[in-house]
Amino acid sequence: MTNSSIGRRPGQPIYLDYQATTPCDPRVVDKMLPYFTEKFGNPHSRNHAYGWEAEEAVEVAREQIAAIIGGDAKEIIFTSGATESNNLAIKGVAQFYKGKRDHIVTVVTEHKCVLDTCRHLEQEGFKVTYLPVQTNGLIDLAELDAAITDKTAIVSVMGVNNEIGVIQPLAEIGALCRKKGAFFHTDCAQAVGKIPLDVNAMNIDLMSISGHKIYGPKGVGALFVRRRPRVRLVPMINGGGQERGMRSGTLATPLCVGLGEACAIAQAEMGAETERLRGLRDRLLGGLRQRLPEIYVNGDLDNRVAGNINISFAFVEGEGLMMGVKDLAVSSGSACTSASLEPSYVLRALGLDAEMAHTSLRFGLGRFTTQDDIEYAIDHTVKAVEHLRSLSPLWDMHLEGVDIKSIQWAEH
Amino acid sequence: MAYSDKVVDHYEHPRNVGSMDKDSTDVGTGLVGAPACGDVMKLQIKVSAEGIIEDAKFKTFGCGSAIASSSLVTEWVKGKTLDEAAAIKNTDIANELALPPVKIHCSVLAEDAIKAAIADYKKKSAPAGDESEKAAG
């Protein structure tokens, strides 16, 4: 497989869903392969060369992961992915400090695995504050300040939102948490390799990292757990005491190596790649705006990663639009396929009307996206939106000057 | 989710897209659904003096299954009497388009659209004696 075929195989749509997952970079796969076969040792075997070479590889990976976030290798715990990291960070800290501190602060637009973990802890008796976001998707620091009490064990705020790509003010949040004595956890699955991160400058105590969002393998992630001041947590998986006792189980050497190499590549290429992606993203948005009226960007455009744009195309329904852009692999904020018919909770949290949330598409651009992909995406999307607007009674009403909100709709 | 070939065909080549004069007495208009729910269907029927549906037009905001359901019913109601059209069941639509369970509501909405269009036509073409009711409605 060559790079030019990644994300655009014949007969397959062009891949523009890099926030859902990324392909493994072939350079990452090359580094991983020997650890499946000839270098198969258990990295915890201390008494022979097979174990030593596996251990050495794992430790190199740990250094590479620590380097991209400005931490120390000893502070990196390998996990199965960001979902596990988020569970371990929040449950682990909450349970360790239970009795002294029983309050958690998080945000309504967090990933489901953070929100569901918090809901689970509520059932165990913890109190959780779910902060709202402003219309641009960012939290209000004054509201965060007011929410943290002397009973707050942990504050969990994601670095970059998976749907709308907005970047929360991590340094300011970290400073606030440190001042008030609460631990700061951040889910950086979508942030690592996309924006500069420094756990010390930003006062981050725990950080979740995902392999498959950064061109590494699926099934591996990491949790940064600060040593000074020390963060203590109750492990969720008990066993042989690997990973400083916080996560037992034999490490998957090839996956660890892959995550490490993915971090090293991302760190080396981030500056130039961000500029390239921003150029493509701006071209995509500009091209769509030039040809289509009534389109709206969801979330802050400035405080946003370069590879994400989330757009509402007024008066066309998102799932219908996805069907129209069948040559593009994108995702929609419309959850019409789910039985609930509820549109994205993230878009609703921005204050978007349900009808606007239903009309959104998320375009995720990444390492293998080309200028040609973007030109095709613009043309294909414009044609689909025009087709659907020609079918849309709401578009007709808009053209006639009818305010859709003034109509008494029968909600079903 | 994979769509059936018939849904894709109606989505890509919708039949009878358009609008008729909603104020005309021989036209009945049904507007059902809600933008907040992700589906709005507008179905219009033109009824002859003999009570036969001569023409039908639709416009739909919604997913592919909603568009296909409304496109399909415009084909089905043409040439039918009002009673025959009113007898079209959502299950007929769902079966014809092989809609999966999560899309059954699209066919329900299409059935509602037919009934709403017929009701609107009947209201408008009601005998002159019912003028007061018409004004109130």
Image: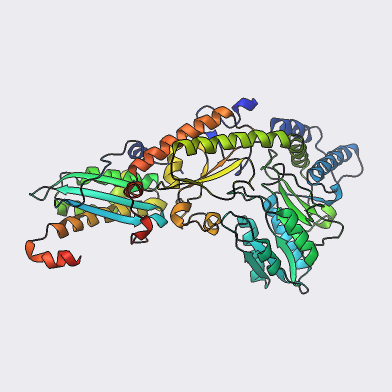
The answer to whether any part of residue A236 appears in the image is no
Residue A174 position in % (x across, y down)? 76, 58
Quarter of the image with the N terminus of chain A is top right
The location of residue A256, given as percent across then percent down, is 77, 42
Residue A34 visible from this viewpoint = yes
Image quadrant assignment for residue A49: top right
Q: In which quarter of the image is residue A246?
A: bottom right
Left or right of B58 in this view: A366:
right
x 32%, y 36%: residue:
B13
Left or right side of A376 for B121: left
Q: Residue furthest front?
A: A401
Residue A250 sits above or below residue A382 on the image: below
Residue A119, how many percent across, how many down?
62, 65
Front-lying residue, A22 or B133: B133
Task: Find residue B5 and report its image quarter.
Answer: top left
Q: Position of residue A148 (x, y in %)?
A: 72, 68
**Up-down relation of residue A181 to residue A369 (above or below):** below
Along the line of sight, which residue is nearer the eye, A343 or B9? A343
The residue under the point 43% across, 42% down is A293
